[in-house]
Amino acid sequence: MINWQGRIDGKTPEHLRIHQLVTPFKHEQESGVVMLGFACDEGVRRNQGRVGAAMAPDIIRRQMANFAVHQDIHLYDAGNIACEGGDLEDAQHVLAHTVQDILEQHHLPIVLGGGHEVALGSFSGLFNAYKAKAPRIGIINFDAHFDLREDSIGSSGTPFLQIAKHLEAHGQEFHYLCLGICENSNTQALFSRAKDLKVGFIYDNQLTTKYMAKNLHQIEQFLEKVDIIHLSIDLDVFSYMQAPGVSAPAVLGVELGVIEQLLQVIFSSKKVRLADIAECNPTYDIQHHTARLAAYLTMDIIKTWSVLCKNGI
């Protein structure tokens, strides 16, 4: 775990900030939220993207450190998993094992990437933790890209196709909803593959307040079909003005306020069991805008989950 530091206004509950609250993850702790860093961008390199996301987890934590605490939160830090020597598959395996362990201790894991190859390791941990119950797992991915690329090796562009193949091998359906798709950033082949896999999606220019009712209906229909949710947020779903520090900055993107509304609906289903945030790239960030956005989203998830736990999730 990093050395959490920040401003101290006092030590009573009404003065607390995140850095005063977070503790190392251990077994037999009260149910809460566990942050886990995936310090890896080998998948981005393989996908011919802009590397640098491996540095993101600790920078996101630093942007969170001074956030004020307004809920009864149990927050733990499980440190970082690094990708050594370009061995992405081993890093994903370690990530899966750690996520599984966190879930089996009845916590919500929030995995801080790292490239979007994080999604495969995160999902594998969720699948292994719940495989005895064989639930219908749904994936909701806020992303400008499908990440269904067919390739001989895994990368940041392949995780959801790898997940689809994994589920098929285990006789389970692939339930995948991708929100914020940019038509210009996905080839016809990717759209065809999404159609073949019965992937639901909403374009970035349709993910607006104008179409909110229609979008909520599609999301609610998806939520009804599944038992548990893997939530994944690729920061390139936002415009480059909100998130300049990503591998593939978006021109249009989706507004934060819209995504916040949709997240509230997704979490109100009480089905989210795992979240990951991907593609924050400090090398190309401007005054930590993207890291601050990632920290804000992480805090939003922590607060929402804490309220749900209090109300008996």
Image (cartoon, rainbow, N blue to C red):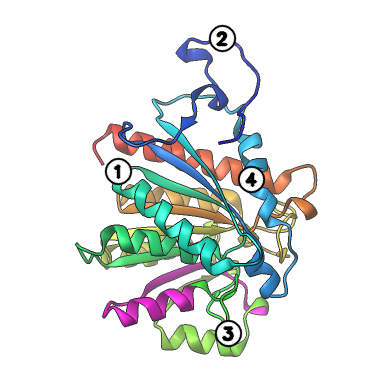
Amino acid type for the residue under numbered disc 4: Leu
Q: Which residue is mark 1?
A: 106
Is there CB contact under 8 Å for labels 1 and 3?
Answer: no
Q: Secondary structure at mark 3?
A: loop
The crowding category of the residue bearing disc 1, from other C-alpha atoms within 10 Å (few below 14, some 14 to 19, many at least 20), is some
The answer to which image quadrant residue 251 occupies is bottom right
**Extreme residue toward the front, this view:** 85
Q: Is residue 33 left or right of residue 64?
A: left
Instruction: Judge left or right: residue 62 versus residue 111.
Output: right
Q: Nearer the viewer, mark 2 or mark 4?
A: 2
Tell me the distance, in whole angstroms, between the alpha carbons under discs 4 and 3.
Answer: 31 Å
For the residues labelled 2 and 4, the Cα–Cα distance comes to 26 Å
Classify mark 4: helix, strand or loop. Answer: helix
Residue 293, numbered circle: 4
Please tell me whether mark 3 or mark 2 is closer to you in this view: 3
Specify the label residue 151 is tagged with. 3
